[in-house]
Amino acid sequence: SSLVEQTTPAAFLFSDTSSSVSNVNFIDLDLDIVELGGTVQWLQPNETLHVQGYFVYLAINEVGAGRSLIGSLVTEGTNELFFHADTQMHSYAHIVVYTKSVLFEQTTPVDFVFSDV
């Protein structure tokens, strides 16, 4: 009835874990100014039960503003992404890595500030 409290409650088991990568690193192997190329590497999270993979982007800042995807989803168990030389820097100064779970992409990335000098 709409006037009586339910006598048999329903339950749902959920998991609230944090699974961010760490120690993001990149060495630019492209010798041209304003162009990038090389391998982005990171350490996987300690907790990977719900991790499907990782998205790697070039971004304007550490929170991923103006981001541009490099490649595609990097599957869990892999901790690096190679991208070809001659990738234009535009106004990007950060490489950001987001963890992807079954439900969604992480909202706060881990970043690496690069320099092309």
Image (cartoon, rainbow, N blue to C red):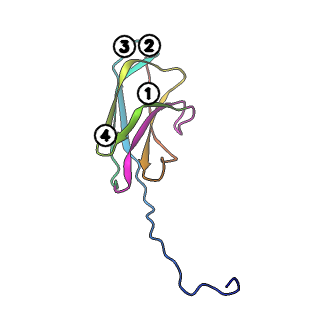
Q: Could you classify mark 4 by the number of other residues whose Cα lies within 10 Å: few (under 14), some (14-19), or many (20 or more)?
A: some
Q: Would you name the residue on which mark 3 appears?
A: 31
Magenta segment, which residues? Answer: 49-66
User: How far is the residue under mark 3 from the one under mark 1?
Assistant: 14 Å
Q: Earlier in the sequence, mark 2 or mark 4?
A: 2
Give the mark toward the camera: 2 or 4. 4
3 or 4: mark nearer the eye: 4
Q: CA distance from mark 1 to mark 2?
A: 13 Å
Residue designated by label 2: 33
Tell me the amino acid under the disc marked 4. Answer: Asn
Pointer 4: what residue? 79
Q: Residue at x 48, y 48 (%)?
A: 106
Q: Position of residue 116 (x, y in %)?
A: 43, 19
Coordinates of residue 99 in the picture (x, y in percent): 42, 46
- Closer to the observer: label 4 or label 1? 4
Residue at image location 44% in from the left, 70% down from the top:
13
